[in-house]
Amino acid sequence: MNMRALLAGSTALIGLLQPSASAAQGDAPAQAASAPETGEGLQEIIVTAQRREENLQKAALAVSAIAGNALTQQSVTQATDLSRLIPSIQIQPAHSYTQIYLRGVGTFGANSFAENSVAFNLDGVYLSRPAGPSGLFYDLERVEVLKGPQGTLYGRNATGGAINIITAKPKRDRFEGYANAEYGNYDTLKLSGAVNAPLGNAAALRIAGQLSQHDGYFSDGSDDERTRAVRGQILLAPEGSRFDMTISVDYAHLGGIGGGGTIVPLVRSGSRLGASDPRVQAAYQSYAPTAPVPQIVIPNAGSQDNSFFGAHATINVDLDFAKLTIVPAYRRTHYDVTSMSGGFVLDIDEKSHQTSVEARLAGISGPLNWVLGGYYFDEQVKSDQSFDQASNATLILSDLGTRSAAAFGQATYSLTDSFRLTGGLRYTRDEKEQDTLARSQPFVGFVPNVFPLRPLILDIPTVALTDASSKKLTWKAGVEFDAAPRSLVYASVSTGYKSGVLFPALTANISRPEKLTAVTLGSKNRFLDNRLQLNLEGFLWKYKDQQISHLGAVNVAPGIFGPVFITDNAGKLTIYGAEAELLFQVTPDDLLSANLQYLHTNYDSLRYQYYSSAGAPPGVGCPVTPTNLSGTTPIARIFDVDCSGRAGVNAPKWTLNLAYEHVFDLDAAGRIRVGADTRIQSGRYLTVDFLPSAYQDGFMKSNARITYETEDGRYALTAFVNNLENKFTYSGSVQSPVKNGLFYNRVDPPRTYGVRASLKF
């Protein structure tokens, strides 16, 4: 991407479309792609991406925001649904885990050792577990997606960016509430609502809840949803006081079967035969190695019984010269899942406890806008994991611990009324420990002279003990210039860091931290009396020591290597591209939006080791070389894999989102809103195997809706359809650990439709 050309083009456009002075709209957080209620121009969105409230169009960083009402309109109830709305992210399920990729930066995490490379935050509280985003998408003010490393203000594990979930807060000045009820095909039922009540003049209470469920999309009932969630918040803000505090408590439960998948030869036909379907099991057993080598028999579709509890407070104190903010938090998760979606029996029982506290001091001193802070994080995870493929089983019992402490600061200095400089630093120290017992149980043949044949299974125990620490200084430097009253040009260089990830091995059982440096040049503009918004961004990212997750060879006994799904350092990735966001209020009743991203990714280096239980060369689309390392069985082989020069994973070159909405004003009879949106995306690889079975071709998916609203907006009725084309697309992929080249793929939802009724009071 030619950064100079981007700057020249945006500056020329500013000159051609110089906006006239007009009053800004109120700070109500409205969806950027929703038609405003009046004809006075596009509404403003207030974000807190830089730990302070500011207009989205004045924030000198790449961030997209979606308002809570737009999430309801799009039937968003879980993190994976965000992939439909924002071109820069690809979010895919892994049984009940959530794998987040932002512009090709992410982690294929599928066990208790995994950590995401894109930070996920709830009201400023970092959620560490990959299952953490569950049961949160209701009664929201907005969702913010920060693109690029956020190492200064967000710290560890924000290599690719951050997703901020901002809940709707209690209000002291009104009693209000709403209720939404939705019903659709696959026996879909979604209920959500909230009540806000003032408690005198000094306090307010807000209670919200959600129920979301649908039958499974696969033949065995898998890929269903059973979510129940509730959240309570209380605001304490005495009149005339310089103190306020919001206390939030939330609970969610996910039941049902959970994610589904099936083998690619069957899924390609457009069928949704689940992993436990007899036809899928017969096809699986026909792949080598076949019987009499032990074959896994999947007894059922699986189950999940996951619960999430969290409590946090946000305390603000006005100190005259600055505002002090303290955010103490506690979260507990119990993740109990049995999944068959990868073609084997996965059983994880994981319990985690997380405590954290962040303290920030923010103020404005003349031309200096600054923030200083400290952060502490402690997490303890106890996990029992079993991965059974019949001919190779692994049992892992772990106690894992993470402690992290950081100090940070960022400041913006105004050299003139229109030109500013920004700088920031963060020092982080991480400590990680594990006490793990892993048992590898490979099939090595048959008991001699015994009939009928009896499999001979070894039992190789491995004790993994780790006590490691790392430290990192991350930084940001930037400039910003107000080219016109409603036009901002900015540039920055920033860094990100993700701590090492543990895995069960006798030695060398933690990866090195990964690092990313990003150069960004952007422009944010409003033209035509605040009716046209055009935001442009060019970016260049350098990704070093990237952590990838795969079936690798680890030291399970002295001189012996066994197969474990690990996260290790494998490569260097160069990423560059551009993104353009257009929002145009054509008339007071017509709104057009377009979001286009071009993304180029290339592995300068991508090398890792692959464990082949059957001894055959691995099923990968890259050159392989056998090693002399010894496996747990006489026939097992370990190969070096070199995928340098390939494109990044989950990084489509082109992504385009288009949306249009028209409002028919019926005067006193109300109004009718008609809207449609579509996503056009080029192909992408889903895993580092780089094989056609794990490749999703380009596609186009569209959604449409029509809503009737009463004049006062209290009542609304919507009919909608999502995935209008009923396009069959993969959301994820995993290769069988024991049958090279056989892939189980997860699939996005089919066409869904229904009606939604809404009430406000």
Image (spheres, rainbow, N blue to C red):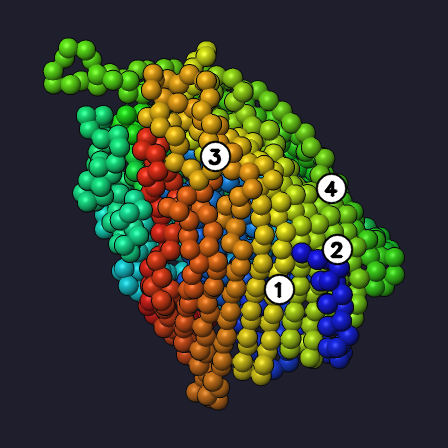
Numbered disc in front, either 3 or 1: 3
Q: How far apart are the two marked residues, 2 and 1, measured between alpha carbons?
A: 16 Å
Of callouts 3 and 4, the N-terminal one: 4
- Does the CB distance between marks 2 and 1 fall below 8 Å? no
According to the image, label 4 marks what residue?
A: 475
Which residue is at a point 36% across and 21% down the rendered structure image?
A: 636
Q: Which residue is mark 3?
A: 623
Q: Which mark is residue 491?
A: 2
- The mark that comes first in sequence, 1 or 4, is 4
Q: Secondary structure at mark 2?
A: strand
Q: How many marks?
A: 4
Q: Secondary structure at mark 3?
A: loop
**Residue 261: percent from the left, percent from the top?**
32, 46
Label ID, residue 580 = 1
Callout 2: few (<14), some (14-19), or many (20+) C-alpha neighbours within 10 Å?
A: many
The residue at 71%/39% (across/down) is: 474
Is residue 68 visible to the viewer in this orientation of the structure?
no
When asked about the image quadrant of residue 744, the answer is top left
Q: Earlier in the sequence, mark 2 or mark 4?
A: 4
Say which element carries label 1: strand
At horizontal 46% and vertical 67% (from top left) the residue drawn is: 678
Query: 340 or 74: nearer the eye?
Result: 340
Disc 4 residue type (three-letter) = Trp
Along the line of sight, the residue nearer the viewer: 615 or 153: 615
In the image, taking residue 273 as reference, residue 585 lies left or right, namely right
Viewer-nearest of discs 3 and 2: 3
Identify whether 667 is placed above or below 3: below
Query: Depth-wise, is mark 2 or mark 4 nearer the camera?
Result: 2
Task: Residue 746: give its label.
Answer: none
The Cα atoms of the two marked residues, 3 and 2, are separated by 40 Å
